[in-house]
Amino acid sequence: MGPLVPTRSCSKGSHPRTIVPGAAHTSGHEPGPCIAPAAPYRSVVTQPMTPSHTSTLTVRVAPSLAQVDARAWDACAQGGFIPEPSEAATPTDPRNPFLVHAFLSALEESGSAVPRSGWAGAHVLVEDADGTLLACAPCYLKSHSQGEYVFDYGWADAYERAGGRYYPKLQVSVPFTPATGPRLLVRAGPRAEEARATLVEGLRSLRRQTGASSIHLTFLPRGDWEDLGRRGFLQRTDQQFHWTNDGYGGFDDFLAALASRKRKVVKRERRDALANGIEIVHLTGSDIREEHWDAFFAFYMDTGSRKWGRPYLTRTFFSLVGERMADRIVLIMARRGGRWIAGAINFVGADALYGRNWGCIEDHPFLHFEVCYYQAIDFALSRGLKRVEAGAQGEHKLARGYRPVTTYSAHDLADPALRRAVADYLQRERLYVEAAQEELLEHAPFRKE
């Protein structure tokens, strides 16, 4: 990343070691909106957005989604759609299942995304004079960089070695969920643009107040990424692998689009995955019971413990989302001899199936590919969904018909020296991501025209 020059204003002693709700801190890096006291965090009143306009909007920070009205939050997350009270238990916004209050609050209530795990809620809310929520952002004060899937460990290490303190930082994202979606949630209406600008300024004010080194908005839609770039955020790209429904009538149509050799490989993998008497079952809605969550959690814990040491999600989380979002969940489970042996959890959006977590307690050749990739394609085709997002990374997905796509994140760094070093690195990284994607597309398994 290049050498970092420590600055006096960003020395180790300039940031508090821990974040205490209600504690104010001003870094001195730049002037910002005035801070008005309000428990448990301080309310932030924005300065005028332009010299000719004075905003009457107010920004406040909620340490928990339990303190935010669910219907008001979802009205922002859903671009103005407000569910009827009878729909509250199973939100019906079709676009992105991870942004609704039910999902985010389940992460907190279950003890998965909480201060003791390094995810201290600091959700930024923009309200008008009547107290109507016009915009919000799922934001967390982080004491580490785990569970984010956009890796900045190198930045943190370099900054610490140069004499700075990288943590705490502000993370605007859905915890443990590498799925693209809006992070600046704005209710549709005549004040939408003003509310959006106020939300960005509120995030920067919170960064100054808490002494955080930076703000990170990850897995953004490209339009939001471009907008934040114009607002001075550094722009980063990476890639995932998504399957796209190019008008296939069924799995056989998808296979027909593959090169002959690749088609034979997929057929063999699917056949071998089920060779030991394994049965695949799709469970959704009321078909999902606690016994299924018990089995799935055993898979999740076994695989998660082996891969990264400590799985992020608690058992309670799965019960909560199962209760609140059952119709938007698809459990793809594998059974052998009457015993559940593997499974994957997926969430359904308007035009996409989002594959999230996988686990198993028995190893069988190609079972992971069958449960996570091929069965997900089958389900997406049955529902007429346009794509399958199968999570972060994984070039092995390319051979299974998943194409590389670009993902986007935006970063606001307080220290000018750190910002310069990271900006230089990101410029080169974006070129690398673009070149790597072009090369991977050349090796996609589809028939050449």
Image: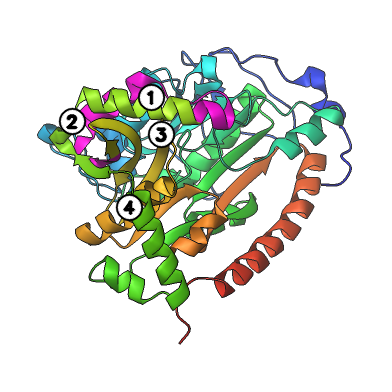
Looking at the image, which residue sits at the far left? 86
Q: CA distance from mark 2 to mark 1?
A: 26 Å
Name the residue tied to disc 4: 376
Q: How many numbered marks, from 0 up? A: 4
Residue topped by disc 3: 360
Q: CA distance from mark 4 to mark 2?
A: 25 Å
C-alpha span from label 2 to label 3:
30 Å
Q: Which residues are magenta?
A: 304-333
Badge 4 marks a residue whose secondary structure is: helix
Q: Earlier in the sequence, mark 2 or mark 3?
A: 2
Q: Which of the marked residues, 1 or 4, is nearer the chain's N terminus? A: 1
Residue 224 image offset from top left, x and y in percent: 49, 54
User: Residue 164 in the image: x percent, y percent?
Assistant: 81, 28
| Earlier sequence position, callout 2 versus callout 1 | 2
Q: Is residue 110 left or right of residue 83?
A: right
Q: Which mark is residue 323?
A: none
The amino acid marked with disc number 1 is Ala
Instruction: Tell me residue 409's x, y (percent).
Output: 57, 49
Label 4 crowd bin: few (<14), some (14–19), many (20+), radius 10 Å: many
Q: Is residue 47 visible?
A: no
**Could you tell whether 1 is left or right of 275 in the image?**
right
Label 4 vs 2, first from the N-terminus: 2
Q: Which residue is mark 1?
A: 298
Residue type at numbered disc 2: Ala
Residue bearing mark 2: 89
> In the image, what residue type sits under mark 3?
Cys
- Provide the major secondary structure of the magenta segment: helix
